[in-house]
Amino acid sequence: MKLSSVGIEDIKFPVKIRQKKGGHQQTVAEVNLRVDMPRSSRDSCITIITTVLNKYQDDLSVTVFPQLLSEIKDELKAESAHMEMTFPYFIEKKAPVSGTASLMEYKCCFTGGIDRQHDLIISVWVPVTTLCPCSKEISECGAHNQRAEVNFNVRYQGFIWVEDLITLVESTASCEVFALLKRPDEKYVTERAFNNPMFVEDVVRRVAEQALTLPDISWFSVGVESFESIHKHSAYAFVDSTELR
Amino acid sequence: MKLSSVGIEDIKFPVKIRQKKGGHQQTVAEVNLRVDMPRSSRDSCITIITTVLNKYQDDLSVTVFPQLLSEIKDELKAESAHMEMTFPYFIEKKAPVSGTASLMEYKCCFTGGIDRQHDLIISVWVPVTTLCPCSKEISECGAHNQRAEVNFNVRYQGFIWVEDLITLVESTASCEVFALLKRPDEKYVTERAFNNPMFVEDVVRRVAEQALTLPDISWFSVGVESFESIHKHSAYAFVDSTELR
Amino acid sequence: MKLSSVGIEDIKFPVKIRQKKGGHQQTVAEVNLRVDMPRSSRDSCITIITTVLNKYQDDLSVTVFPQLLSEIKDELKAESAHMEMTFPYFIEKKAPVSGTASLMEYKCCFTGGIDRQHDLIISVWVPVTTLCPCSKEISECGAHNQRAEVNFNVRYQGFIWVEDLITLVESTASCEVFALLKRPDEKYVTERAFNNPMFVEDVVRRVAEQALTLPDISWFSVGVESFESIHKHSAYAFVDSTELR
Amino acid sequence: MKLSSVGIEDIKFPVKIRQKKGGHQQTVAEVNLRVDMPRSSRDSCITIITTVLNKYQDDLSVTVFPQLLSEIKDELKAESAHMEMTFPYFIEKKAPVSGTASLMEYKCCFTGGIDRQHDLIISVWVPVTTLCPCSKEISECGAHNQRAEVNFNVRYQGFIWVEDLITLVESTASCEVFALLKRPDEKYVTERAFNNPMFVEDVVRRVAEQALTLPDISWFSVGVESFESIHKHSAYAFVDSTELR
């Protein structure tokens, strides 16, 4: 029987990610890596994978993915190689009114594959606020709102910054989220969300509409989970671009 | 050197919990169990613990804790025994206006100990809504609100239902949370929260004030984590009754 | 734009699962449910989903999936409905030598979908022991071994018990795992594993070979994660039946 | 009523940790922070906490804890402040025979408190191998072994490197764990573990014995969880130094 893919899971590495603002950001990635290969010493398979990972640990980024994966594939004479690298990424944001700067953390993931050709999916998880249109419409005052998380996954022709994907998502919800807000900022985000009510599927739709305007995005999916403030469960919406064409 | 305590962790059992409304509720508990004992065959120690757990699996409840722990302590000639049993517990709630019934799930935990005497802590985790007083005060419309979780832990002289501890907590926040709400119910909870703004520490204070009115509570602690809708992080407040006296 | 699918996530329900040995087993399921539908009141969408879930809470099992999903699809005039139900399932196992009975817990999942036709995937996660062939071969004594978890997912024509899928998996590793072992049992499992060394890909291959002998399995995938005792990371292997044909 | 402590939870920051080998290591910390204070504007409380955290984000380490906590305490006129900082920490290890270098990741935590005086607990979680003495004794060949995790927490008078605490722990188990092993290394660790069988309580006892030889450790606790390869549950042992005196 053709050998199943083999690899390693749940291994952490310090990695340096190139930043849009310049320079690299050092963070910590959790890595899963698998290869498809003809039967052979699996002992050497795991050793080679770990050796190459150790070799790249000081400069592992989306731009070196093809190189790293090709190297593993070649050394193992594998038919294919597949790697996920998930990491927290920090971006300085300015509060909307006071301009107070603080760091926001975003979960990001690069998923690379290589067989005959290369494939790369860039994923970001972006916290936002959703405010319920129904609750606002039927209530004399207020409207329930909550933190929601947008998961945006794209295949991109060429290069795009995760910063740009995050910015795209933050523009689509009832309001974006910040690490530090002064009172005038809190007033702004409260009113902004109240005047901009959205269901999870509205956020999904707006992210999708934005994505469709970028011709270099060859595929995307969007999932939004809203941690409902009036329920213990979440509301969820999802779309895959292949269903839109 | 005196032997450290030994035991087992992360083992799941189906358990039956006696309900206030009558009868038992079958659920699934995750159990951690430890004993302090003079040096001896640890092999038999684990076997006896597991055997007793298996024996009680069909009727494990807060009322049989002393019996189960005593049995383990005696069989092992242990100086003490300690057990945690965490489980999801379901209570039917009626929506506030329509009266529509649905099941709410609450995380509960019984923590029992025995050395010379018995000790028992009952813990409940109750989801609620918090609405920010500051956001309401400074904004022309709306107020940020979110789901929060109240963790209430008590030592009780005699018997008390977890249902009663949950009811106590649900009365203290901006609004309680439901599994199923019709439109008139959603209008009610939205307005109720808006008219009842609270910081996490206000919820902590109100739970503590309620607990202090129950003379049979010999000790309690309250922690409230609010999953802020305008931040990625949580606001948290905590009090231990020993700090209040 | 076509509406994205909408639904609820992370909601727990008590469910009754039909057992091979007869009768039902009560356990607790975590449910995710999504529907694809033309634009409409999402408020009613969530309400209908939750209402139907509450209606079925006392007898939710793989056999009522088609009925439940059809009901949601019809009530919402949806194009499709999709539901995952993950739950711990308990099976009494007898120790291999002493015959001592104890309960083993297995994570199971039913994933049902309906659009024009029905689809159902049954998943089980089975803990096993893997003992490293390389370590045994090169060492003068002993061999490193560890707990591993096999995730087996199948599409089945007709009906199959999760018990049967679990039994299939437990026969394929270095040794199966038990909740309670007496000394003669511990001697047996130690020697059994030592005499039956396997890499994660050997376990994957054996599960796949077994699955291929069952004509009613129209599709399957197998993933094995081994929590290596000599590393902090896991070894992993995976196969999808579509790659075998 | 005296105000409960208030603060923030689950916020991530990039932090730089001073290394024993020289220089700083950049990693990512998850921070929880709480203060006890007289009633006052909680809005400013959260803002000040976040502001100070942002100020220190580029050089947060055990040595600046007292300064950071004092600053928060003073700015808030708080009675006390308490902070936990948990982070993955990487140390280069050489394989025991081949000397091949690879990075090991260890979970570490600094827990600082200040009221009238300062308090600091340093915690490390160290993966190790445990090999069962009973299994070895009763079996004709082999012995079950598995990954275990040692949690070692200390109060230290003066300064100690987390590297030194980790080294202390790694010397106490059946064998230490590595990220990358060549065949001769795998032979070594297999035989080393087989010739060095230990129960979880043996590991606890040896860590405690080592700790008692260090006069500057004013308090410690040790917990060891062994992910049994023959069971689905863990074996656990624990000791607190206060029980030893």
Image (cartoon, coloured by chain):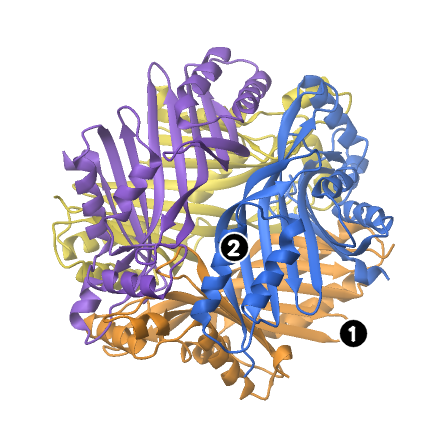
Chain colours: A yellow, B blue, C purple, D orange
Return the x and y of residue B135 as percentages of the image width and height: 76, 38
Q: Nearer the viewer, residue A60 or D151?
A: D151
Q: Secondary structure at mark 2?
A: helix
The chain identifier of the residue carrying mark 2 reads B
In the image, is A204 to the left or to the right of A220?
right
Return the x and y of residue C17 as percentages of the image width and height: 44, 32
Number of marks in the rendered image = 2
Q: Nearer the viewer, residue A19 or C44?
A: C44
Image quadrant holding the C terminus of chain C, namely top left
Label 1 CA crowd tier, 10 Å (few <14, some 14–19, many 20+):
few
Q: Quadrant of residue D82?
A: bottom right
Which residue, given by chain and number where applicable, does mark 1 sit on? D116
In the image, is C25 to the left or to the right of C187?
right
Residue B53: mark in rendering: 2
Question: Is B60 placed above or below A228 here?
Answer: below
Question: Is C121 placed above or below C92 here?
Answer: above
Label 2 CA crowd tier, 10 Å (few <14, some 14–19, many 20+):
many
Q: Are marks 1 and 2 in contact (CB under 8 Å)?
A: no
Q: Amino acid at mark 1?
A: Arg
Q: Amino acid at mark 2?
A: Leu
Could you tell me if residue A173 is visible in this image? yes
Q: Secondary structure at mark 1?
A: loop
Could you tell me if residue D58 is visible in this image? no
How far is disc 1 from disc 2 in space, using C-alphas?
46 Å
Q: Nearer the viewer, residue C113 or C100?
A: C100
Q: Are marks 1 and 2 on the same chain?
A: no
| x 23%, y 64%: residue | C194
| x 31%, y 42%: residue | C166
Q: Quadrant of residue C175?
A: bottom left
Residue C13: mark in rendering: none
Query: In front: mark 1 or mark 2?
Result: 2
Return the x and y of residue B194 as percentages of the image width and height: 77, 31
